[in-house]
Image (spheres, rainbow, N blue to C red):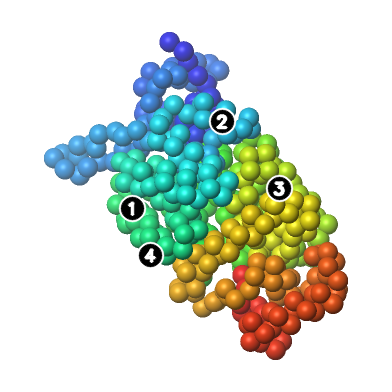
Amino acid sequence: MDYLSVKEIAELWGVSIRMVNYYLNTGRIQGAIRKSGGWLIPANTPHPADLRKSGQRGQEKIPPRMAKCYMPLISRPCDNGFQNLLLTISDEEERDIARALHHYFRDEHEEAREISEKYLTSKCPEIRLSALITNTMAMLQTGDAAKCRRNLEMIQRDGQRANDDSWRLYSSITDALISVFFHSEKLDLTPIRPAIGILPPGMQYFAMYAIAHALYIRREYEHAMGIAESALLMAGTRYPIDSIYLNIVLCMICMSLKQDERAEQKFDAAWSIASREGYIHPFVEHHGILQGQVERALRKQEPETYNKIVQSVYRFSRGWMKIHNPVSTLQVTDALTPYEFSIAMLAAKGRSNKEIAALMGISVNTVKSYMESIFEKLQISSRNEIDAYVNR
């Protein structure tokens, strides 16, 4: 029989070392052998889910279920590319969710929607929640707000039914990611902070991205920067999705702090990683709050890719607003083109026409012309009023 170390089992299952040790110390891993140098675990041992007492007939235990990897393309190391990652995933459901996420990040929303649709009612909570969040994000491109809302309601109900620790953990993480994604005004990630340590490393770093993004929304830029920088240092090249999102949120923060050169470095780092697999959708999601960095880096240098991003921004942002605006006091406008929105964001952040011109690579007169169009479309007369119509 082949045996693996705690670290190897953690990577195989897509969980943290701390979680594996927890299973070992509570006797939940059958066949594990304790040696002087640490534990040896059978390579084919199943991943145990946490058990609860049923409360029926003398406290009988609920039969164990197989816990699976939540958001596998994010949770698992992927430093050798997506196709090589698939070869390491033996479970069919996990492989399909990884494929759905791969298509989503490549802006192939129909493929992401079709694959994730099959698992919206999976018996495994980790797979079901992964499918629900992936399907919801992919559906935004279609503008089907009713279907998105049904998915969000299913996520809420799922959390209310959770009856083991892994299920409760990933329900709370899914709720947190959704709240950040839609810039919820009730955003509070305090409840998930104690749980971060038992997440698999890839999800730890993505959760830290979510916390940094939440702090960005609250304009606590320095605090957000510290968290994102720490997570990026740990993610390295092993977790490319994390590194893309962390570099993006750092670019957003640096732009808001007017650290333009550093912002460019962070954007370029994110783009360098993303372009290897064609992962353009993270830049679609964050287009406006990247404050012109997409235009700076891609409009002239990669016009075909830039146009693809812009077309996706139109669809995605309109779908996003259908979910965000009805429940928010901040009504993000759909009256502007993506290019105008980038200029409006810069103006809302206090940039002068000269600064905007330098950042966007256009003349001051061109900026003035765009600003006149923005004022007319928003029916405003002052730059101070723009902030009420754009992302924070």
- Of all residues, the one furthest to the front in this rendering is 304
Screen quadrant of the N terminus:
top left
Amino acid type of the residue tagged 1 in the rendering: Asp
Amino acid type of the residue tagged 2 in the rendering: Gln
Residue closer to the observer: 94 or 32: 94
Q: Residues within 10 Å of mark 3 (few under 14, many from 20)?
A: many
Residue 83 image label = 2
Amino acid type of the residue tagged 3 in the rendering: Trp
Label 2: state its secondary structure. helix
C-alpha gap between disc 3 and disc 1: 35 Å
Q: Residue at x 35, y 53 (%)?
A: 159
Label 1: state its secondary structure. helix
User: Where 2 sits versus 299, above or below?
Assistant: above
Residue 192 in the image, given as x and y percentages of width and height: 49, 53
Say left or right for 80 vs 97: right
Residue closer to the observer: 166 or 87: 87
**In this orientation, does residue 169 appear?**
no
List the residue tagged with mark 3: 271
Residue 371 in the image, given as x and y percentages of width and height: 74, 79
C-alpha gap between disc 2 and disc 3: 20 Å
- Of the residues under marks 4 and 1, which one precedes in the sequence? 4
List the residue tagged with mark 4: 146
**In this orientation, does residue 66 appear?**
yes
- Of the residues under marks 2 and 3, which one precedes in the sequence? 2
Q: Residue at x 42, y 43 (%)?
A: 115
User: Where 330 sits versus 117, above or below?
Assistant: below
User: Where 273 sits versus 194, above or below?
Assistant: above
- Of the residues under marks 3 and 1, which one precedes in the sequence? 1
Amino acid type of the residue tagged 4 in the rendering: Ala
C-alpha gap between disc 4 and disc 1: 18 Å
C-alpha gap between disc 4 and disc 3: 33 Å
